[in-house]
Image (cartoon, rainbow, N blue to C red):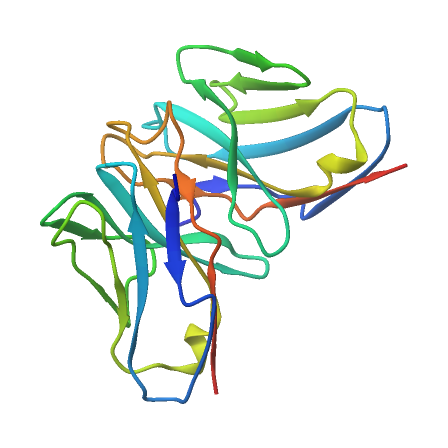
Amino acid sequence: DQQVKQNSPSLSVQEGRISILNCDYTNSMFDYFLWYKKYPAEGPTFLISISSIKDKNEDGRFTVFLNKSAKHLSLHIVPSQPGDSAVYFCAGPPGNTGKLIFGQGTTLQVKP
Amino acid sequence: NAGVTQTPKFQVLKTGQSMTLQCAQDMNHEYMSWYRQDPGMGLRLIHYSVGAGITDQGEVPNGYNVSRSTTEDFPLRLLSAAPSQTSVYFCASSRGAKGTVYGYTFGSGTRLTVV
């Protein structure tokens, strides 16, 4: 049972344009969602989070949108830069369990 | 400040051998977790701990054991390695009650190959 799903394995965009990464979830018990970024041969790094009581959170070039009725969230990167090329994971904690469940990841390539 | 330290970085095992992947954090974090990353599967939770002396199973716990005798350390044991355990393993820790607002801090990973 995949509670957090990222259905697009890869995305390619031009530098300066918007990147939109999508994530769907099946469990309504998630209180927060997080996005992580991962470069090859490194551990994932925390990027941005959103509480389930909000529908938007912004941090510089990164904005996360949450649509609770659709059980869908998305990460927008504007403008995209070549250094943003990485694997992006969405994640959430199901209920008050202390564990974090990740999606399959989306590989973003930003072309100069 | 070292953060989350994993050792070793690389390891090759023969089928049936045992080993322990080490994880240590110096941030006094309560929550620690082990994940494995496989192509197309994302990061899957193996075991996690919400404090010293407390552990629980994640999504893929079979073949792995953990213990948490101190706040700092959270070793992952493979009792009898199998080729299906070939993967990259990540340890993570968090100070938050739910590890969400603050996010989890990850180590740099251990690449394990079982032949």
Which residue is drawn at the image coordinates 12% and 46% (left, top)?
B52
Residue farthest toward the front in the current orientation of the protein: B1
- Please tell me which residue lies in front, A22 or B105: B105
Image coordinates for residue B19, horizontal then vertical, percent: 30, 77
Residue farthest toward the right in the current orientation of the protein: A112
Which residue is drawn at the image coordinates 26% and 70% (left, top)?
B77
The correct choice, above or below, for A49 with respect to B82 in the image is above
Image coordinates for residue A30, horizontal then vertical, percent: 35, 28
- Please tell me which residue lies in front, B74 or A17: B74
Query: For the C terminus of chain A, which image quadrant?
Result: top right
Which residue is drawn at the image coordinates 47% and 58% (left, top)?
B109
For residue B59, side relative to residue A11 (left or right) = left
Tally of marks: 0
The correct choice, above or below, for B90 with respect to B81 in the image is above
Residue farthest toward the left in the current orientation of the protein: B53
- Please tell me which residue lies in front, A15 or A95: A15
Image coordinates for residue A50, horizontal then vertical, percent: 46, 19
The correct choice, above or below, for B1 with respect to B79 in the image is above
Image coordinates for residue A99, horizontal then vertical, percent: 30, 41
For residue B5, side relative to residue A65 (left or right) = left
Which residue is drawn at the image coordinates 48% and 18% (left, top)?
A69
Q: Quadrant of residue A83?
A: top right
